[in-house]
Image: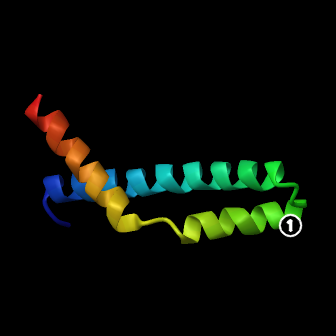
Amino acid sequence: MGRPESRQALHAAAEAVRRACLRAAMDGYERAGLGGLCEEGRWEMVIDAIRSLDVDAIVREDAAGSKTSEAS
């Protein structure tokens, strides 16, 4: 199954991506509403916000956070 450390790292990265997706979805929906878009347009904005996420940046940020917490 793999080493526990690598499973933990994968889980942490997946959680970071999930948080980023939720944040992007909520932000996109809110911005679209403020922009006057209809419900369908708001959901299109949500999908676009999630598709445009920089997953590599999210994983790098999560890895940097993990290193900082390990050093404490």
Q: Position of residue 39 (x, y in %)?
A: 88, 60
Question: Which amino acid type is marked by label 1?
Answer: Glu
Indicate left or right for 26 with 14 as reference.
right
Q: Which residue is mark 1?
A: 40
Indicate left or right for 42 with 28 as reference.
right
Q: Position of residue 52 (x, y in %)?
A: 53, 70
Q: Residues within 10 Å of mark 1 (few under 14, many from 20)?
A: few
| Residue farthest to the top, as pictured | 72
User: Which colour assignment does the render follow?
Assistant: rainbow
The front one of 56 and 15 is: 56
Q: Give above or below for 44 relative to 67.
A: below
The front one of 13 and 25 is: 25
**Quadrant of residue 46 within the rendered picture:** bottom right
| Residue farthest to the front, as pictured | 35
Q: Position of residue 22 (x, y in %)?
A: 57, 51
**Quadrant of residue 17 within the rendered picture:** bottom left
Q: Give above or below for 72 relative to 32.
A: above
State which quarter of the image contains the N terminus.
bottom left
Q: How many marks?
A: 1
| Residue farthest to the left, as pictured | 71
- The residue located at (86%, 66%) in the rendering is 40
- The residue located at (29%, 50%) in the rendering is 62
- The residue located at (72%, 65%) in the rendering is 45
Secondary structure beneath label 1: helix
Q: Position of residue 11 (x, y in %)?
A: 32, 54
